[in-house]
Image: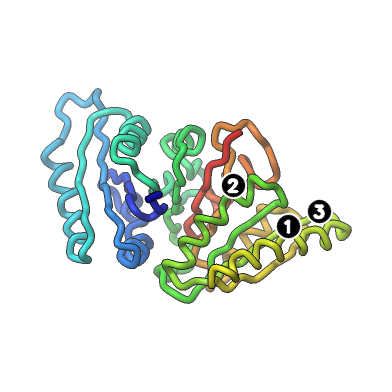
Amino acid sequence: MPKTMLERVLIPLDGSPRAESILAFLRPILCRSGSEVFLVRALEPSSPHAPLQEADDYLKGVAERFQEDGLCAHPLVCVGAAHQVIEDLAANEEVTLIAMSTHGGSPEDDPMGPVMERMLRQSARPLLALRPGRADDLPRPPLRPHRSILVPLDGSEASRRSIPLALELAETLDARVILMRVIDRPTEETEALHALHDVAERLHRAGIIAEIWIESGDPVEKILQACRDEDIQLVVQTTQGRSGRSDRLFGSVTRQIMKRSPVPVLAVHVRG
């Protein structure tokens, strides 16, 4: 039987509140889906006295929180470069989703961080990213049922590859799906409506409520504007991976959304 995206979830942690900020968002989803959770801490091999016991105790404490929810949680401490540790564990444990916080929330810094950048370029697995909040951010409500998942599409077949994962999340959360297309010219509206209507019909047949939003302007700003709606709790969007493509909603646009979004972003990798 094929694995679902939420079946085996890997969460990299480094002991910081920033890294842990994704846990509050994930736990409601993982509890509802009965996920198996892999908590990983990567220690740099250059450290002369790697704090293995300290890291192990920390991860066991986090694992206990998930175990109290009735989930199977594995604390795993490894020595090596973080991106390589994550990818190796994901392959060995047949992980179906990697979920992690981005590097930070300061506008002066690159919020993605080198590990997230490397994962976006090279990982073959869906990557759920959460930008830690800044002091001036409004509080974010936890993930809960009966809210909305935003799915930006650009009219390409590749961008529609995010739909199966959005459908799985919508079923798990009893959420509606908002299908969004940002167009350049008014003449594109009819074609965009037809394309989104076909996707909405597919979701309706699966029992999911779907809405269609057509906007015009800059894709990044229009998507971020939609994310500020308190009803939106998650963005599901394709990203470039290693395909080398540069469609509007691939690569740089997805990266900007992940850097600036006030809600978690699920990046679905597309190749070829």
Residue shown at the point (74%, 59%) measured from the top left: 195
Helix, strand or loop at disc 1? strand
- Front-most of residues 56 and 250: 250
The spot of residue 145 in percent (x, y) is: 43, 74
Distance, label 2 to label 3, CA atoms, is: 18 Å
How far is the residue under mark 1 from the one under mark 2? 14 Å
Residue drawn 84% across the image and 57% down it: 188
Q: How crowded is mark 3: few (under 14 residues within 10 Å), some or many (20 or more)?
A: few
Q: Position of residue 19 (x, y in %)?
A: 34, 49
Circle 1 residue: 182
Residue 165, percent across and down? Answer: 50, 55
- Quadrant location of the C terminus? top right
Quadrant of the image occupied by residue 178: bottom right
Q: In this view, does 138 lie above or below 83?
A: below
The three-letter amino acid code for the residue at tag 2 is Thr
Q: What element carries label 2?
A: helix
The first of marks 2 and 3 along the sequence is: 3
Q: Does the rendering let one see residue 16?
A: yes
31 w.r.t. 126: above or below: below
Q: Can residue 24 be seen in this view?
A: no
220 or 93, nearer to the observer: 93
The residue at which mark 3 appears reads as 184
Question: Considering only vertical position in the picture, is 138 above or below 49?
Answer: below
Q: Mark 2 points at which residue?
A: 254
Tell me which residue sits at (24%, 25%) in the image: 45
What's the distance in space between the residues labelled 3 and 1, CA to CA?
7 Å
Extreme residue toward the bottom, this view: 146
The percent coordinates of residue 50 (x first, y second) are 17, 31
- Above/below status of 167 relative to 46: below
